[in-house]
Amino acid sequence: MSKVHTAPRRWSKPPLIKDSRLRWFLALGGAVYLALAFGTMDVNWGRVAEGIPRGLNFIAAFFPPDFVTRWDEIVDGIYESLWMTVTSTVVGIALSIPIGLGAAKNLAPRWVYLFCRGILAVSRSFQEIILAIFFVKLFGFGPFAGFVTLSIATIGFYGKLLAEDIEDMDPGQAEAVRATGASWFQWLNYAVQPQVMPRMIGLGLYRFDINFRESAVVGIVGGGGIGATLNTAFDRYEFDSAAAILLIIIAIVMAVEYSSGYVRKWVQ
Amino acid sequence: MPVRETQGLKTWQHRERGKQLAIWAGWLVATIIFVYCWQLISDKTTWFFVLDAHHQAADLGERMVPPKFSYMSKLWQPLWDTINIATLGTLLALVLAVPTAFCAARNTTPSRTLVRPVALFIIVSSRSINSLIWALMLVAIVGPGVFAGVIAIGLRSIGFCAKLLYEAIEEIDETQVEAVTATGASGAQVLAYGIVPQILPAFAGISVFRWDINIRESTVLGLVGAGGIGLQLNASILSLAWTEVSVILLVIIATVILSEWVSAKVRHAII
């Protein structure tokens, strides 16, 4: 090795992906995909241009938001959404605990693991709306269908995160508690639960927030709650009432978000 | 340590008595709230229909098998549209979310009193309004089709991406920024060499994560006319072609599981 290393004259930023072939392959693949995607997406620009003034009228129809005319319906809808949110969050979390425990690789035997993971995968795959369509068919219109929908969606979300959290826990503590001769339930209560609890409380609050937001759309397909009110407002072309509903949803989501931040700080 | 002494015998307790009582009281209040809410829902429910549900479910299940797999040939195009809606929508959201996030982060915002609240409001409103509602409005504006779906997904995802991104920006290591500033770098250079490299992994993780969520969301946009496989789903449900519905549902499950797998792989590779 007689070659003398000289410092390069110019410094350049190291690339994000080191392998240059992979880098070019990804860039080329991305470009081809974008070309294909835009190629198949036929945008009717005439319709868009025509739609923009219509869109502006549409947006103008939202102002000023009308809180008064439909106030009673709005209040009813909001209450119904809140009940649905509370019950479905509680029931969903309660059901997701056994499923989440079963879906943790380090806790459950293999067949239980696969079974529970299957439940989680299926309940996560379907968007709330698709579930809601079916549950409205099964249970009839009204908040019960929305409640079942949101509970199932909660199971998929919460169970998966619980299972992952249990899989990531510190095995040392679990072993220590097991070494004292604790029974399985004691082991669960004193070794597993304290390790996953703080994060799970935070996620429970987050799910509450999501469920409230989702309750605004399950109503569109007949699942009750504020979504039903919103849909009616759209159907009657009462966009000012719709704007009021949207603003109320935003305000409640904001309030839940701020308060959940405080609760999380207080719990941890 | 919480220990209770009874007749000279010390027993270890999980918690102090006061704390235990407080926890019980908390549970009591929570149970009351739950029961009250349940009561209200129950009042609004026609229990006759609910009790009848298992017959309905069995009937529906019977009509859904066997899935009509020949229908698959008509599903490739909508499936491709669905994936495009999710991907292009995510790209649109990222383009819009980056400036929003920089405006919303405490340490990079141009003005805390003026710009930051606006950025936060954009984030919250985009997050609170579901993509289906966005789609409902956009179909009225730009007409039905994939384009409305892309914009709906894009607008909906700004909030999520910008929120996670601005939290990442707020958590950066300030000393690196200071070091780059000390070399006499301009504002843009500080951004490019001091901040961006620190948030790049988070950015990549967020975009893949959101893409995965968007695949799921874009399956339903068709219900309001915004393109994708939801259009077929809606048509099949309305025409009561349940064997087609089951094929569509299977396709959706397969797509979602595949996208979840891809996103998990990519995130592992990045982080």
Image (cartoon, rainbow, N blue to C red):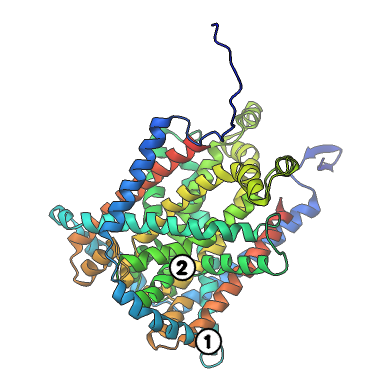
What's the residue type where badge 1 is placed?
A: Phe
Position of the N terminus of chain A, as image quadrant, is top right
The front one of B259 and B169 is B169
Left or right of A73: which side holds B86? Answer: left
What's the residue type where badge 2 is placed?
A: Asn
Farthest left residue in view:
B70
User: Disc 1 versus disc 2: distance between alpha carbons?
Assistant: 20 Å
Q: Position of residue A214 (x, y in %)?
A: 47, 67
Q: In this figure, which residue is indicated by the disc labeled 2?
A: B130
- Quarter residue B114 falls in: bottom right
Q: Residues within 10 Å of mark 2 (few under 14, many from 20)?
A: many
Query: Residue at left 48%, top 30%?
Result: A18
Farthest top residue in view:
A2
For disc 1, the chain is A
Q: Position of residue B70 (x, y in %)?
A: 12, 54
- Res A49 seen here: yes
Q: Is residue B184 above or below residue A10?
A: below
Front of the two marks 1 and 2: 1
- State the SS at label 1: loop
Q: Residues within 10 Å of mark 1 (few under 14, many from 20)?
A: few
Disc number for residue A63:
1
- Res A225 seen here: no
Left or right of B226: which side holds B210? Answer: right
The front one of B86 and A66 is B86
- Quarter residue B138 falls in: bottom left
Q: Position of residue A127 (x, y in %)?
A: 39, 60
Query: Residue at left 43%, top 76%?
Result: A224
- State the SS at label 2: loop
Please tell me if label 1 and label 2 are on a single chain. Answer: no
For disc 2, the chain is B
